[in-house]
Image (tube, rainbow, N blue to C red):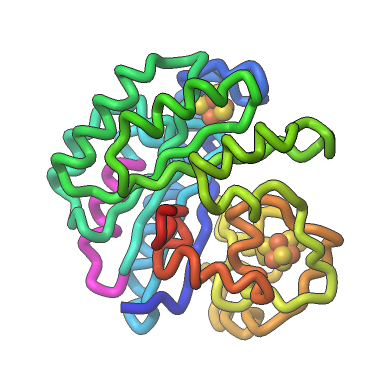
């Protein structure tokens, strides 16, 4: 079933149980009030998806913090996966939560974008979670932030994960000389598609599906084309909001995040990721 709307949802939640030193959300705890608001907004979103039976919908949750430790996200994933017109429900997660809730999902529609944070958990713990996902037959990608000092550990992870589990690396791009040619060689051996992530793609004036067949939604239902162009183009709870979805050109100079540039038509990344663009699982892992 091909997807005609890929929706990126980012709600109010922003707390996380981890404390990565490069992250503004580290160990921030959401108040009970914030979590209640987030749960209500999420429930409204899921109810809305339920009504859109004529669409084929794929959803990627891209929370600022860690959402899967919250029951309301687990329940949302379960409900969404069981809707016949939802073909995919995915979420970015640090994989620290219990995974038993997956039992109640339509597992073939769930896919996890799992990030390994070497300073916050052990490889052993993370791999145990991956084994659980394998046992559940739930698809997932494994990713890491490409700090040079983490490369050795990522190589070890590559050795220990099943060969067909795709590992992606989020390259650091601020300093053009951060990586040596040898670093890039090693990174490519881990993630054969890392070259797409090593640069900020020139995007201004180029067709992008963001704002047409893919769009971002916040807890209030406000829509933006993507997470990187903050201009609101409507609200999913308004009648006929679809009128604001049409083919567009990118207005930003560059696009450097997977969740954005995968929709940049000139890159044709559907050839690399097929129908697994949202959860970042490459079709060909070599
Ligand atoms: S796990 Fe993710 S959200 Fe949490 S502190 Fe680390 S980078 Fe931030
Ligand atoms: S190329 Fe990136 S920044 Fe531009 S519209 Fe697409 S997703 Fe947004």
- 278 over 29 or under it: above or below: below
Question: Is residue 85 on the magenta stretch?
Answer: yes
Q: Is residue 123 left or right of residue 92?
A: left
Within the displayed image, which quadrant is ligand 1 positioned in? top right
Q: Is residue 120 left or right of residue 96?
A: right
Question: Residue 232 appears at what percent x and percent y?
Answer: 72, 63
Q: Can residue 31 be seen at all in this image of the molecule?
A: no
- 6 over 239 or under it: above or below: above
- 101 over 48 or under it: above or below: above
Q: Can residue 26 be seen at all in this image of the molecule?
A: yes
Q: Quadrant of residue 202?
A: bottom right
> Who is closer to the viewer here, 31 or 8?
8
Question: Residue 28 appears at what percent x and percent y?
Answer: 57, 19
Question: Is residue 238 on the magenta stretch?
Answer: no
> Who is closer to the viewer here, 70 or 131?
131
Residue drawn at point x = 55 percent, y = 76 percent = 213
In which quadrant will I find the N terminus? Answer: bottom left
**Residue stretch rendered in magenta on the structure:** 73-86
Question: Residue 277 appears at what percent x and percent y?
Answer: 47, 62
- 131 over 30 or under it: above or below: below
Q: Is residue 252 left or right of residue 144?
A: right
How would you classify the magenta stretch by its main secondary structure?
Answer: helix
Residue drawn at point x = 23 percent, y = 39 percent = 133
Q: Is residue 165 left or right of residue 146?
A: left
Q: Quadrant of residue 159?
A: top left
Question: Residue 152 appears at what percent x and percent y?
Answer: 52, 22
Residue drawn at point x = 46 percent, y = 19 percent = 17
Residue drawn at point x = 74 percent, y = 33 percent = 179
């Amino acid at each position: 079933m091909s997807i005609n709307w890929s929706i990126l949802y980012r709600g109010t939640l922003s707390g996380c149980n981890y404390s990565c030193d490069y992250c503004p959300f580290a160990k921030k705890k959401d108040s009970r009030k914030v979590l209640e608001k987030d749960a209500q907004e999420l429930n409204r979103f899921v109810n809305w998806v339920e009504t859109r039976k004529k669409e084929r919908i794929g959803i990627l949750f891209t929370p600022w913090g860690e959402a899967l430790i919250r029951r309301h996200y687990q329940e949302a994933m379960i409900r969404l996966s069981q809707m016949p017109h939802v073909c995919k429900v995915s979420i970015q997660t640090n994989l620290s939560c219990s995974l038993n809730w997956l039992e109640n999902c339509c597992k073939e529609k769930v896919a996890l974008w799992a990030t390994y944070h070497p300073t916050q958990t052990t490889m052993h713990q993370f791999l145990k979670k991956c084994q659980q996902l394998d046992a559940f037959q739930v698809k997932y990608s494994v990713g890491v932030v490409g700090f040079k000092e983490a490369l050795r550990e990522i190589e070890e992870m590559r050795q220990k994960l099943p060969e067909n589990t795709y590992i992606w690396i989020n390259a650091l791009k601020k300093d053009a000389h951060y990586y040596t040619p040898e670093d890039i060689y090693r990174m490519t051996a881990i993630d054969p598609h890392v070259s797409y992530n090593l640069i900020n793609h020139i995007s201004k004036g180029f067709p992008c599906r963001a704002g047409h067949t893919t769009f971002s939604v916040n807890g209030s239902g406000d829509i933006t084309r993507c997470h990187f162009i903050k201009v609101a183009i409507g609200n999913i709870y308004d009648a006929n909001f679809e009128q604001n979805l049409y083919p567009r050109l990118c207005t930003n100079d560059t696009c450097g995040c997977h969740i954005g540039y995968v929709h940049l038509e000139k890159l044709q990344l559907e050839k690399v990721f097929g129908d697994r663009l949202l959860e970042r699982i490459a079709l060909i892992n070599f």
